[in-house]
Image (cartoon, rainbow, N blue to C red):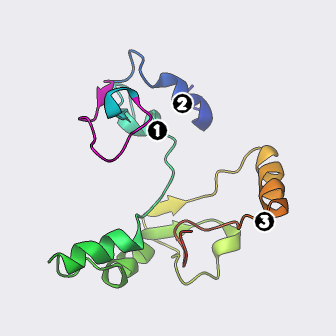
Amino acid sequence: MIQVPIAALGLQNTKEDWAFRTVPQKHACLGLKEQRSAWPRGKVLGGSSSLNIMHYIRGSKHDYDSWAREGCEGWDFKAVLPYFIKSEDNQILALNDSEYHGKGGYLTVTDGSTTPLVDVFERAMRELGYPLTDCNGKSQK
């Protein structure tokens, strides 16, 4: 199951997973039992990466800017973005010309789209008027 990314979800909460859970959250995990989120950690070769799907998200621009306003000097999004770009080796052809993505870094980023269902979902989103968004690009909305 480790070899097929979506199947790796089937390893969570099994003997291959330490099955950690977060502490109860006050303002999150509202639909989860005891407001606690699963925190999969792998007991297998490859560790936690073998249990998680590895969706690459840098984090919210607004969070970085908020941390900077709270006193974390140098943590505003404008300051950290160059480091994200430098670390990235973007392999997604549609993002080759994006100023928000880099080439040649240590972190290989691919789209992982290996099923025709992705095309169906994208077409449905367009038909319903939803934008297709690069979650690591200019807008995260």
Residue 77, visible in the rendered structure:
yes
Q: Which residue is mark 3?
A: 129
- Of labels 2 and 1, earlier in sequence is 2
| Residue under the point 70% across and 71% down | 94
Q: Quadrant of the C terminus?
A: bottom right
Amino acid of disc 3: Gly
Answer left or right for 28 relative to 123. left
**Main SS of the magenta segment?**
loop
Q: Is residue 4 visible?
A: no
Front position in the image: 105 or 35: 35
Badge 2 is on which residue? 8
Q: Is residue 111 above or below residue 36?
A: below
The mark lying in front, picked from 3 and 1, is 3
CA gap between label 3 and label 1 equals 30 Å
Residue type at tag 1: Asn
Q: Is residue 24 magenta?
A: yes
- Callout 1 secondary element: loop
Mark 2 → mark 1, Cα distance in angstroms: 7 Å
Residue at mark 3 to residue at mark 2: CA–CA distance: 32 Å
Q: Is residue 128 above or below residue 94?
A: above
